[in-house]
Structure formats: structure tokens, C-alpha cells
Image (cartoon, rainbow, N blue to C red):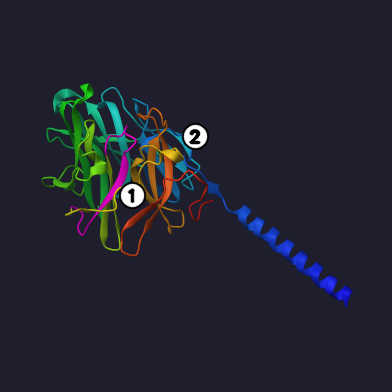
Amino acid sequence: MESNALRVMIKKILLSVVLIVMQFQLFGQNKYYTNPVSDTVFIADPFVLNHEGIYYLYGTTASSRGFQYCTSKNLVDWQPGGFAYERIENSWGQTNFWAPEVIFYKDQFYLIYSAVGQTMFGNGLRLCLAVSDKPTGPFVDLYAPLFDLGYSCIDGHIFLDDGTPYLYYEMVGSVGEFRKNDGFLWGYIFGVELSPDLSGIKNEPTLCLYPSQEWEGINSMKARSNEGMTVFKNNNTYYITYSGNHYEDPNYGVGYATASKPLGMWTKSEHNPILKQDIPNKVSGPGHNSIIKSPDNSEWFIIYHSHASLTHPNHVRILNIDRLKFLPDGSLKVHGPTRTPQLYPTGAQ
């Protein structure tokens, strides 16, 4: 009897050991990433395009020549490429190459960006549109600038709604001498339908968003701004994510608004910001995002930048990705900003 009991006990112990080993093996099969996702990609205003299973990353860098790109199969491991767009001697845009975004439309790739160009169109920045047969470029200017309404425009974003192109951008200006702490920058988000060939706007732009919530810096003497927008649709609701405050401010963050039509009326969420600083976890100024799905199309991710330095937040920024959730009532929630290990996007190789 004692011998049988001992054998049973030994079998139970061995079974427990086997189960523990199997659990460790299964756990070891999972892959984890930690933000920032790259120690070598210093990029602001990140935009990600998914084309035929490859992710293409574009953004604002220190280059004064144009825009470089990176590629990935999983949103985490990025390989640097060359220049997707590089100015030439007679390019209209000459400096301040900011916030590039790329869409695939009618079998071609279109890059929209902002730059400072020749003075024939007045001072300040304008939006430009370039075209290429490949997401890696080389992109060649098609309309530079795309239009000129007599004021500076940045952060161009093209949203395709059942094939109809809509353009969103930030109108920017200043009050007083903000560089002398005697004034501030301001920014409003406008939207407008584009012509089918993307050659220009079809009508007068519509005001979509302006600074109205306290976190957006409505009393700031640096910037009172809504900017860096991304528009997408889910369950017949249009969402626009945007950033508020000054990009060098640790309080720079992300909010969102919803509408029943592409140009609004837009209603800001009372839960804004959905992405904000977390200094104890070493996150400062998370913002200017794009939205993309995981490789198997089952998860939503928000791609955004944050300050590379906590003590001296400035224009040097780093790349982050976190999960974006739709709650049962349709509201958005970001699982982040994170600095702890996170599972790779589902379907990642």
C-alpha cells in the first residue's frame, strides 16, 4: 500500500513538473517589445502605411533634404531605408520638411507634406503633394504647393472615405512675439474634400477643431493648438485623433473627437486626453499619432512620438506603439503610454 501511494505521489510530482515546464515553454514562445520601439529611430510626427503586408514608416527627422523611410513586418522591428523624397535644386520646398504621410490611391502612392518654399507664394509653410509608383519612392512633386490660401498650413492628412478623398490640415499663426515670451502660436484644424485627381480643393475648407479643452493649452503663452490629426472610421462613426499644446511641452498629448460625417460637426471626448505624459515612467509629450492595424488585422495600434529627453524636452523625439481599444459605447482608450514589456502585435512574424 505504501509503495502504491509513493508511486502515485511521484507521478503527481512528475506531472506537475511537466505542466510547469510546458507553461514556461509556452510563455517563452511569446514575443515582447518595450517602448520606445527603437533606439536608433529618432523621428517625430510618425505615419505608418501598410501595403501588401509591409509597414512603411515616414516622419519628420533632422534632415533638411526631405524624408527617409523605414520598413517593418511587425510594427516593432524597423529597418532604415533611404530617402523616399529628396528635394532637388528647383524644388519648390527648400526647408522645414515636416509631417509626411503617404496614401495608396488609384494604383499610385501620394505623399503629402509641408515645407517652406519660394516666396512667390508668400511667407510660411504650405502643403505639397508628390507621387511615386512605389511606397519607397522616389516621390516627385506633383503639386507644390497643393494650394495657397494666404496662410501657413502644416500636418496634411488625406482620408479616403469609400474612395472620396478628404484633406485635413492645421492652419497656423501667431499672436505677438512668441519667441520673446510676448505672444503664442495657435493652430486650428480644417477639413475639405479634394478633387478626384487630388489636384486641389473642391470648396471652402471647414473648421473642424480648435483649442477648447484645458489640456490643449488654451491659456498657454507658447501654443494654443490642435494639430497632428488622423481620421478613420469604425462602425459608421468617424474618429479624429489630434494633438494639443506645444510640441516641446511635456503636457503635449492626444485627444479625439467623433462625427457622423467626414467634415463634422465634430464632438470632442470628455475623457480627453487619451494619451498624456507619465513622468514617473519616463514618458514626456506623447503626441502626433497615426493609426494602424496589426498584421492579422485584429488589433488597432496608435503610433506616436514622445520626447527623447525628460529633462530637456525639445524637437528630438522617439517612436512608440501602443494598443488602441474601442469600448462598448464606442469611446476610445489607449493602453499606454507604456514602458513595460508588451506582447507583439497579433500576427507578427
Looking at the picture, does residue 346 appear above or below residue 36?
A: below
Looking at the picture, does residue 88 appear above or below residue 227?
A: above
Discs 1/2, front: 1
Q: Which of 177 and 107 is in front in this view?
A: 177
Q: Residue at x 25, y 53 (%)?
A: 270
What's the amino acid at mark 2? Asp
Q: Estimate how packed mark 1 is, as few (under 14), some (14 to 19) or many (20 or more) residues with alpha carbons within 10 Å.
A: some
Q: Estimate how packed mark 2 is, as few (under 14), some (14 to 19) or many (20 or more) residues with alpha carbons within 10 Å.
A: few
Q: In which quarter of the image is residue 110?
A: top left
Query: Is label 1 in a helix, a strand or a loop?
Result: loop
Residue 39 numbered mark, or none: 2
Q: How far apart are the two marked residues, 1 and 2, measured between alpha carbons?
A: 25 Å
Residue 318 % position (x, y): 42, 35
Looking at the picture, does residue 125 appear above or below residue 232?
A: above
Residue 256 % position (x, y): 28, 50
Whether residue 17 is in magenta: the answer is no
Q: Which residue is drawn at 16% across and 37% down?
A: 147
Q: Residue at x 37, y 27 (%)?
A: 62
Query: Is label 2 in a helix, a strand or a loop?
Result: loop
Q: Which residue is drawn at 38% across and 39% down?
A: 305
Name the residue beneath numbered marker 1.
Answer: 274
Count of labels shown? 2
Mark positioned earlier in the residue sequence (1 or 2): 2
Residue 253 visible in the picture: yes
What span is colored magenta in the figure?
A: 245-263
Residue 120 % position (x, y): 14, 25
Looking at the picture, does residue 345 appear above or below residue 140?
A: below
Q: Is residue 40 left or right of residue 183?
A: right
